[in-house]
């Protein structure tokens, strides 16, 4: 999350702290988007763990309207990944399974495939389904 408003970041930080979501904040040198005219400091709030992202989703899903289906699918994806990677030394040792790839494809389709990554996900699904 990027924001230039310290009050918003303080409130989000408080909510995350109260709910046990680990995060960190770093400062960008110039705020705003190109052409926006903003030159003050801007901050990036980052959650770097799947479990933290899952906690955040569970906090916001009851309040969502427009992206609720994507959030529910992403929550299912995260739950699957968290269960599958527990006990492995590296996440790369638990490659995505077909169900996880399908969940990602559904989210991409619901988002309107604006980045063109749905085909990449579908290729990965086909690769996983093919016998070796």
Image: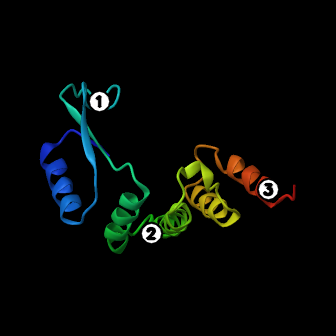
Which of the two residues, 38 or 97, is positioned nearer the viewer here?
97
Mark 3 and mark 2 in contact? Answer it, CB < 8 Å.
no
Instruction: Name the residue located 15 percent from the left edge and 58 percent from the top edge.
Output: 14
First in sequence, mark 1 or 3: give its number. 1
Outermost residue toward the right in this view: 132
Q: Quadrant of residue 64?
A: bottom left
Residue designated by label 1: 36
Q: How is the image coloured?
A: rainbow
- Callout 1: few (<14), some (14-19), or many (20+) C-alpha neighbours within 10 Å? few
Residue designated by label 3: 126
Is 12 drawn above or below residue 71 in the view shown? above
- Callout 2: few (<14), some (14-19), or many (20+) C-alpha neighbours within 10 Å? some
- Callout 3: few (<14), some (14-19), or many (20+) C-alpha neighbours within 10 Å? few
Residue designated by label 2: 68
Q: Secondary structure at mark 2?
A: helix
Which of the two residues, 113 or 87, is positioned nearer the viewer here?
87
The location of residue 129, given as percent across then percent down, is 80, 61
- Whether residue 125 sits left or right of residue 32 in the image: it is right
| Mark pair 3, 2: CA separation | 27 Å
| Mark pair 1, 3: CA separation | 43 Å
């Amino acid at each position: 999350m990027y924001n230039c408003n310290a009050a918003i970041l303080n409130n989000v930080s408080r909510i995350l702290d109260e709910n046990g979501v680990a995060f960190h904040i770093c400062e960008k040198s110039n705020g705003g988007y190109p052409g926006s005219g903003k030159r003050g400091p801007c901050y990036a709030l980052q959650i770097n763990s799947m479990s933290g992202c899952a906690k955040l989703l569970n906090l916001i899903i009851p309040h969502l309207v427009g992206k609720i289906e994507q959030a529910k699918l992403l929550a299912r994806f995260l739950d699957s990944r968290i269960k599958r990677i527990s006990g492995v030394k590296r996440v790369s040792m638990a490659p995505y399974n077909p169900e996880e790839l399908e969940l990602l494809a559904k989210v991409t389709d619901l988002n309107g495939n604006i980045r063109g990554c749905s085909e990449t996900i579908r290729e990965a699904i086909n690769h996983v389904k093919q016998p070796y």
